[in-house]
Amino acid sequence: MDWKRFGFIALIITALFTAVVMVGQSQQRPLMIITSMLATTIAVATPLTLGALAGVFCERSGVVNIGIEGMMLSSAFFGWFTAMYLFNVYHWSLMACIVTGTIVAIFFGGLMGVLLAWLSVTFKVDQIIGGTVINILAVGLTGFLNRQLFFGKTSLFEGTVPSSPGVFSAIHLPITEIFAPLCKGGNLCLENMSAINRVFDQKPIAWAAIILVFISHYVLFHTRWGLRTRAVGEHPRAADTVGINVERMRYANVIIGGMLAGLAGAYFTIESIPSFEPLMTNGRGFISLAAMIFGNWTPIGAWAAALVFGSSQALQINMQIFRDAIPPQWAFLQQSYVVGLTPYILTMLILTGIIGKTTPPAADGVPYEK
Amino acid sequence: MKKLYFVMALVIIASMMLTACGAPAAPVATEAPAATEAPAMTEAPVAATEAPVATEAPSTDCTSPDVFCVGVVTDVGKVDDKSFNQSAWEGVQKSKDDGVADIIQYIETTDAKDYAKNISQFGDAGYDVIVTVGFGLGEATAAAAALYPDVRFIGVDQFQAADVAGVTGLNFPEDNAGFLVGALAAQMSKSAHIGGVFATDLVPPVWRFGEGYRAGALYINPNIKIDVVYHNDVGFDKTFTDPEWAANAANAMVDGGADVIFAGGGKTGNGAVVAAAQRGIYAIGVDTDQYFTLPEAAPRILSSAMKLIVPGVATLIASAKDGSIKDGNFMGDAGYAPFHDLDGEVSAEVKAKMEEIAAGLLDGSIKTNVAPVKP
């Protein structure tokens, strides 16, 4: 475990939260601010976490994946389209539609993974170009289909965008219900408890992302599969010599990565908002890559980094909400682009090696020739 | 290896074609046909740009005085953005339906660097009117007006600080529209806490919506709590296309107790409207009556702060044809959309108050006191 890195990350998140609490405490109780920010942080971090996990699996096996953005975008479209189509044409129930939509999104992400693996493992194409192909393909494909299907009077639904079934609702954990007796009827205590409860009332994909972080950690570092994956990414020739099928390991990991990116895509259109807009992933795939590097190619590190990006987004939103409470000497905080720069400044700091070097897998990006 | 190159070529060609069709790229280097080479004109701008966005191919010659051609250059964003680009295009379509324009065409800008190039596509093809949509195209439009003195330019959302020959800026009192929905939100809020989620305040119309909203809410209730958030932390290329960010911002406000949310700014705003509707609170849309453009949110859309872009564009095109159009600014109309499904929840007093405010804004007895651009 890389405690220096985690300590640095924890310090940053704490600093960001403290700044908002100091500004906003005249308008809202600190606990309320913190819980609201935590909820925002976890939501924002969800696609970044999943995208970063996708990157970890691909790169640990030696395939650079800069196509995460494209994988997310195309999965977001196809997942949403499936859910919407089943809902409007076959009149399935809400839950059936969005669950099927999620599965299709994961499947489609996997399919994009197959494409990347095919290009970069079978044909040994430069992996950066392979990823770029996926990014361009996704922008074109989703934009084209979105236009053909929904825009213009001759399109599938005569120019109207039919209504989408909806999004996953939050899973309510009965924390308040269980611990309420501890409050002995105190109203403030109950209010606090329900505020804390709200942090844990996350939606299914957000929970899945957190659980997948730990599963990925276990798989990569505590199973034979993980050992082989890392061997293939560090020294494929040695792995080949001891009888590991390098191509097959890389294929499998890139497809797993694609499926994770697919789930991230489902977050956009099935969990966050029930509609698709062209280019809606807006560079989050690339921020995921930064999170992966920030986290030194480990699942837990990548998650922590995603939380930093999430909390700086929460800072940016909350600083504006508390705009009127910002003291005059801190007026620069009203310029939201100042706080908006936080994640980028942090990434630069990390890359300068301030908290120790990040080391990519040795064979990352190198096609394996027998 | 041959097979590999074949596959790569295939994939790249396929992706380029799809990109060209779906998100028409900025016109790539074209040989603009000289105005005298009439025969070349039949294949003019679309074929040259590789961007088959045409809903109808120009089959006649736009340089001929008998054929009245209107072209639209969108801002970064799409002509199907369910917002201002789409409205401008609908205005042009309306002028064709009205028999004013003979040939209509649009080019979607994908990169702000291509504004001038896209405008000259139409200029070189001899279009009579070019509609440029969005604040961002202001400078490019003024520059193009000098280059094509025979063309009438209509700049949607482009405030003309000084008159430019050949350019008419179509502007709207967004602050009035924002003021109206702000007053509505303040009256409908039970928690005396409302929110607004907007794209960047560096774009003046967005700023006027946001600050008009604030002013309108304070006009009704000076003690109301108003959360206003702008998406300033990203560039112009992303600030209008980030619905997920807006959804998170809206959710944060709802968590904090806001029970009405107004959202403005292309697809970013759509995200907040839909998120607010999902949470079951009142949502207020922008630009057009979003009850019709966002079916996911329709049942919870209380109203929309409307800029009447469609009639504004059509009126200006008609006056360009009969020659009565003037340089400088043309002020379109703004208002608020009907309550639709939520009509029953809006009391008669609120409706009366809204009409009173609308009348007051129109005759000048109520002022929003919002600066035209962010100071």
Image (cartoon, coloured by chain):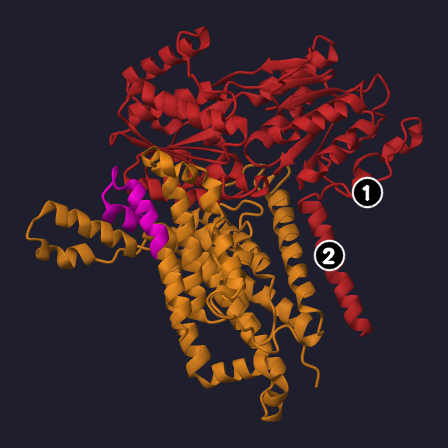
Chain colours: A orange, B red
Q: Is residue A24 magenta?
A: yes
| Quadrant in which residue A339 is drawn | top left
In the rendered view, would you say A52 is above or below A187? below
On the image, the x and y values in percent for residue B187 come to 29, 23
Task: Name the N-terminal-most of marks 2 and 1.
Answer: 2
Q: Nearer the viewer, residue B177 or B165?
A: B165
In the rendered view, would you say B20 is above or below B173? below
Is residue B292 visible in the rendered structure shown here?
yes
Chain letter, disc 2 residue = B
Count neighbours of disc 2 (C-alpha within 10 A) and say few if under 14, some if 14 to 19, many if 20 or more.
some
Q: How many marks?
A: 2
Residue at 13% over, 50% down: A189
Residues in magenta, as a range: A14-36
On the image, the x and y values in percent for residue B196 come to 40, 33
Q: Main secondary structure of the magenta part?
A: helix
Say which element carries label 2.
helix
On the image, the x and y values in percent for residue B344 come to 31, 24
Q: Nearer the viewer, residue B301 or A48?
A: A48
- Circle 2 is placed at which residue position? B14
Q: Nearer the viewer, residue B111 or B79?
A: B111
Say which element carries label 1.
loop
- Circle 1 is placed at which residue position? B29
